[in-house]
């Protein structure tokens, strides 16, 4: 057999690539294998994308690969194709897609070279003694499906090949039960299930449900969990189990979409509308969108579940491109919580609370039920302020205020939520010397403190990014909510989604209005989804669930739709507006965000890239179909001394937009180099 001399390799470097190498006679490298290669003065692990007839530059300049790793079978062709698609769609080098998807042990040269490597990380993993985790006898939680659930399950099982299903089920309608029934069918056919959830905090709940239901079917090693909170060794173990085909169920957050599945039969995306499916750095991908492409590639169904689908998915369902299945009723209590608006214009608030809200919390407490107080703002107070001269606690590095935090054991600090800056709280006004600095507004810490003082007999706890910083602490807190130990839970969006709290009767929303007047055209959609989600935590198992939303604008359409539980009308009306204004899903967008020392430099760069459309002959054909907005500074223009501006590009046609990007982005890159400017490209941005 002829020796395959030349290969093309994907490397995680910020250059276009892929890169050509020679395979010396002593080695054999095939597609999908990982190889060690010299790159500049470094050695890097790369993935063989293909073997080639001849290299694309002179043979004497092509370097030899150093090692071939055969500790795992080659990555499958469909996985490579998937990465190539994501790279082309998001306009990133393929190496930046494929390598970061893998656990770092598999892509660090150091795991294979040097004294301690001992055959590499996979060999070390296999040598480790397997300790089976004894699971507490799982409570039997299988439900006989109700009629709606059964219809949904039957409809999905009837699908042959690829189809996108939108499972629109109100909160508490038992979507999980539908997923589990579907999964059972797929597993018994010997296929794998990929199950995506938006947040790390939701994985334990689903892992438990999956173990309880399927441990007998797939064994303890049959379930692999992938998310960014895992220790490196855990992530490696999960990956290896998936690539070897041992894992029958893969549960994870957005990164799990890159799992090297071997025989996938079904993909489930729970809470498909959730913005957490969008990666906001590096490769800015949407795991929901990629899930649909992946299902299409594998010719299998993909189920998108939500109580409040994204308007993109809703529109696809409306026109029949997706199969829409509906769960209109709750599974347990059969009715939705009563949502009431508390008009705060009329009343004096007590530490941010309307008296009726405090009264309602007291009543639930007396009945032994839990209350959830939702406030999407962490810290103690959002800003401190001098009433005599107007000084405010401004971050020295960013165009935002620093937030007052109480640090247990460290007193008070001012913290910037954008750059991580910490500062001391001044004892007097730095500008005028006034000693009476005021705290303006309130965050979750202050609300927690007040509630504990107002209800001394109650167990009050807070769940937000601060109270859950330590690994495992979020899980402990959620366990304490589930066990009923916590009476009043104060939380940010972390507590709003997905959780099935059994004793929770009341949800109170404090600062909903903050999102009402945002410049982001998706703000009403996001607000509706967020409030419907958090409302959906109330009364899932107890009768008389109630939601109280404090607002100064009760007449706003989003609130009116919410109290009627009327997602459909809200979504359809929103789509009408989007249609008239040519906004997504009726157009497709790309955002270029530039960062520079001054916002003027960033704007200058963007203006120049914008002018290409008119000035470059090879782009002239796109003029009619591409719309470029004026570049604008970002709302928060400066973060960590860097100033930012953005340029939005839009087209009614996705293929036209993609073709345009193919021509335009290389020119943008040249201008970027000339201006020495940092920028990133985001296809299908969610926040503009
Ligand atoms: P969703 O994800 O749609 O918000 P869940 O899947 O969490 O809702 O289900 C809500 C609750 O209803 C869960 O406690 C679940 O065990 C229960 N449940 C689901 N299906 C049924 C059913 N057919 N009969 C009784 N209870 C059910
Ligand atoms: Zn002052
Ligand atoms: Zn800052």
Image (cartoon, helix red, strand yellow):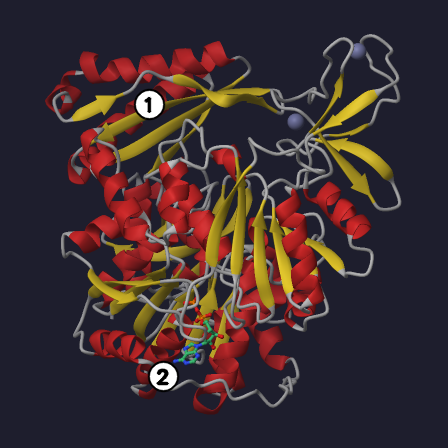
Q: Disc 2 vs disc 1: Cβ atoms closer than 8 Å?
A: no
Q: Which mark is residue 537?
A: none
Q: Position of residue 598 (x, y in %)?
A: 53, 12
Q: Secondary structure at mark 1?
A: helix
Answer left or right for 21 relative to 276.
Answer: left
Q: Residues within 10 Å of mark 1 (few under 14, many from 20)?
A: many
Q: Nearer the viewer, mark 2 or mark 1?
A: 2
* Residue 402: quadrant of the picture: top right
Quadrant including the C terminus: top left
Report the side of 423 relative to 41 (left or right).
right
The image's mark for residue 668 is: 1
Label 2 sits on residue: 184
Q: Residue at x 81, y 49 (%)?
A: 453
Measure the alpha-carbon separation of dots 2 and 1.
Answer: 49 Å
Residue at the spot x=47%, y=12% of the render? 601
Image location (x, y in percent) of residue 250: 44, 71
Percent across and percent down for residue 427 are: 88, 22
Q: From the viewer's perspective, is residue 492 above or below residue 602?
A: below
Residue at figure coordinates x 87%, y 38% from the top left: 411
């Amino acid at each position: 057999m002829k020796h395959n001399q030349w290969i093309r390799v994907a490397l995680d470097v910020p250059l276009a690539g892929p890169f050509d190498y020679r395979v010396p006679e002593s080695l054999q490298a095939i597609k999908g294998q990982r190889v060690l290669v010299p790159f500049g003065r470094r050695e890097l692990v790369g993935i063989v994308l293909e073997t080639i007839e001849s290299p694309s530059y002179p043979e004497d300049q092509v370097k030899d690969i150093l090692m071939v790793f055969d500790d795992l079978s080659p990555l499958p062709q469909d996985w490579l194709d998937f990465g190539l698609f994501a790279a082309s769609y998001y306009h990133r080098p393929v190496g930046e897609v494929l390598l970061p998807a893998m656990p770092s042990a598999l892509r660090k040269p150091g795991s294979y070279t040097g004294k301690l490597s001992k055959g590499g990380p996979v060999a070390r993993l296999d040598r480790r003694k397997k300790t089976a985790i004894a699971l507490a006898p799982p409570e039997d939680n299988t439900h006989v499906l109700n009629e709606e659930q059964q219809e949904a399950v039957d409809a999905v099982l009837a699908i042959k090949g690829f189809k996108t299903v939108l499972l629109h089920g109100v909160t508490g309608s038992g979507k999980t039960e539908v997923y589990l029934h579907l999964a059972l069918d797929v597993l018994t056919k010997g296929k794998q299930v990929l199950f995506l959830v938006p947040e790390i905090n939701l994985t334990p709940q689903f892992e438990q449900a999956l173990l309880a239901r399927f441990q007998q079917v797939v064994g303890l090693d049959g379930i692999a969990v992938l998310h960014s909170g895992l220790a490196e060794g855990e992530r490696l173990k999960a990956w290896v189990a998936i690539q070897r085909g041992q894992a029958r169920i893969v549960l994870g957050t957005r990164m799990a979409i890159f799992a090297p599945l071997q025989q996938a039969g079904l993909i489930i995306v729970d809470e498909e509308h959730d913005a957490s499916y969008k990666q906001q750095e590096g490769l800015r991908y949407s795991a929901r969108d990629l899930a649909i492409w992946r299902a299409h590639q594998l010719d299998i169904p993909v189920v998108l579940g939500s109580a409040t689908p994204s308007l993109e998915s809703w529109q696809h369902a409306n026109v029949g491109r997706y199969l829409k299945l509906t769960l209109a009723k709750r599974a347990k209590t059969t009715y939705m919580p009563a949502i009431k608006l508390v008009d705060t214009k009329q009343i004096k608030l007590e530490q941010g609370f309307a008296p009726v809200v405090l009264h309602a919390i007291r009543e639930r407490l007396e009945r032994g039920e839990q209350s959830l107080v939702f406030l999407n703002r962490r810290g103690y107070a959002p800003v401190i302020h001098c009433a005599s001269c107007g000084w405010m606690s401004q971050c020295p590095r960013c165009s935002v205020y620093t937030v007052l935090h109480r640090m247990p054991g460290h007193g008070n600090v001012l913290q910037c939520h954008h750059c991580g800056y910490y500062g001391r709280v001044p004892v007097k006004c730095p500008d005028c010397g006034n000693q009476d600095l005021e705290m303006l507004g309130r965050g979750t810490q202050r609300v927690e403190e007040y509630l504990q003082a107002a209800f001394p007999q109650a167990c009050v706890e807070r769940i937000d990014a601060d109270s859950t910083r330590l690994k495992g602490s979020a899980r402990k807190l959620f366990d304490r909510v589930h066990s009923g130990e916590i009476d009043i839970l104060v939380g940010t969006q972390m507590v709003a989604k997905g959780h099935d709290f059994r004793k929770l009767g009341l949800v109170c929303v404090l600062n909903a209005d903050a999102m009402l007047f945002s410049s982001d055209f998706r703000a009403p959609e996001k607000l509706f989804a967020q409030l419907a989600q958090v409302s959906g935590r109330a009364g899932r198992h107890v009768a008389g669930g109630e939601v109280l939303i404090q607002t100064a604008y009760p007449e706003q359409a989003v609130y009116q739709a919410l109290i009627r539980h009327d997602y459909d009308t809200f979504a359809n009306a929103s789509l009408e507006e989007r249609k008239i204004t040519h906004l997504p899903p009726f157009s497709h967008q790309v955002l270029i965000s530039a960062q520079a020392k001054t916002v003027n430099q960033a704007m200058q760069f963007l203006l120049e890239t914008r002018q290409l459309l008119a000035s470059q002959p090879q782009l002239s054909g796109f003029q009619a179909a591409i719309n470029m907005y004026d570049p604008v500074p970002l709302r928060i223009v400066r973060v960590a001394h860097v100033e930012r501006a953005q340029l939005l590009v839009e087209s009614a046609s996705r293929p036209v937009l993609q073709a345009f990007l193919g021509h335009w982005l290389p020119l943008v890159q040249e201008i970027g180099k000339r201006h020495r400017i940092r920028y990133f490209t985001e296809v299908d941005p969610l926040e503009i």
